Image (tube, rainbow, N blue to C red):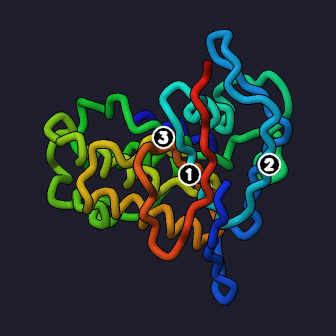
């Protein structure tokens, strides 16, 4: 999983009015956005105003612009026109975690060492074993990353995501390669982030089976 942590259908979005949330005023505002890649126009005039607790499911054929929108929202792809603001800021740093579920882990490390690397970057003091336990990798803490299956690597990626205290998550195909139990873990984490006031954009060809939440849906059309 490549990590770059930069620190429509009706929806039923869960909020916790009676409990304290970590991200109560989260906002992702996309105004009149135009976007292209490789000389091909992907999006024109897109406007989205997303608030705390929103889960937005991006769906559509390959090459239609789902990943490009995520990259633009992460500040990693220049836009052709319009604007994007993150919690009122014009800089995504400290607001966004972008996760593309492909790419190498730190191959020379054990599972525990890999996660500890990210914990050090994000000043996370939680014992590493406690971060690995919810994703089912605690028994593998001393195993080399190279020995993990595809699904186990994605579980490790989910453990990394859980320690990043950012309010906006951008997830690209997080369910690919996971069994039903692994997919349920991802959906549980997204639901918890929503309950905490965060925003999640998910590009996925698979339906999102979120507990207690129905995602909004943005359908992309094939690019001619």
**Image coords of residue 176 (percent x, y):** 33, 43
Task: Judge from the rendering whether residue 195 lies leftward or rightward of residue 162; answer left or right.
Answer: right
Of badges 1 and 2, nearer the viewer stands 1
Spatial separation of the CA atoms under disc 1 and disc 2: 16 Å
Q: Nearer the viewer, residue 63 or 141?
A: 63
Question: Which residue lies under the disc numbered 1?
Answer: 57
Q: Quadrant of residue 53?
A: bottom right
Q: Earlier in the sequence, mark 3 or mark 1?
A: 1
Residue 182, labelled with which disc?
none
From the image, tell me which residue sits under label 3.
172
Assess disc 3: are there few (<14), some (14-19) or many (≥20) residues with their C-alpha within 10 Å of its C-alpha. many
Quarter the N terminus occupies: top left
Give the residue at x 61% y 23%.
223
Dot 1 alpha-carbon crowd within 10 angstroms: few under 14, some 14 to 19, many 20 or more:
many
Quick one: which residue is furthest to the bottom in this view?
A: 18
User: So how many labels did they put on this image?
Assistant: 3
Left or right of 138 in this view: 128: right
- Residue at disc 2, secondary structure: strand
Q: In what quadrant of the picture does the C terminus appear?
A: top right
- Name the side, left or right, on which 15 lies relative to 123: right
Q: Quadrant of residue 5?
A: top right
33 versus 189 height, above or below: above
């Amino acid at each position: 999983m490549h990590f770059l942590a930069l620190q429509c259908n009706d929806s039923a979005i869960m909020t916790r009015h009676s409990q304290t949330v970590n991200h109560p005023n989260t906002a992702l505002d996309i105004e009149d956005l135009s976007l292209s890649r490789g000389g091909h126009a992907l999006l024109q005039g897109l406007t989205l105003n997303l608030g705390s607790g929103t889960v937005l499911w991006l769906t559509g054929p390959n090459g239609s612009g789902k990943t490009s929108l995520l990259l633009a929202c992460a500040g990693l792809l220049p836009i052709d026109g319009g604007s994007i603001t993150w919690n009122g800021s014009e800089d995504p740093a400290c607001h966004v975690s972008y996760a593309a579920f492909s790419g190498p882990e730190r191959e020379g490390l054990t599972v525990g060492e890999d996660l500890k690397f990210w914990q050090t970057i994000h000043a996370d003091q939680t014992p590493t074993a406690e971060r690995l336990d919810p994703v089912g990798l605690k028994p593998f803490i001393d195993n080399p990353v190279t020995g993990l299956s595809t699904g186990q690597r994605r579980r490790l990626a989910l453990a990394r995501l859980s320690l990043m205290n950012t309010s906006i998550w951008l997830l690209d195909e997080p369910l690919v390669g996971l069994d039903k139990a692994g997919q349920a873990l991802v959906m549980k984490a997204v639901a918890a982030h929503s309950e905490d006031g965060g925003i999640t954009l998910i590009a996925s060809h698979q339906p999102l089976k979120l507990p207690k939440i129905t995602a909004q849906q943005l359908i992309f059309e094939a690019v001619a």
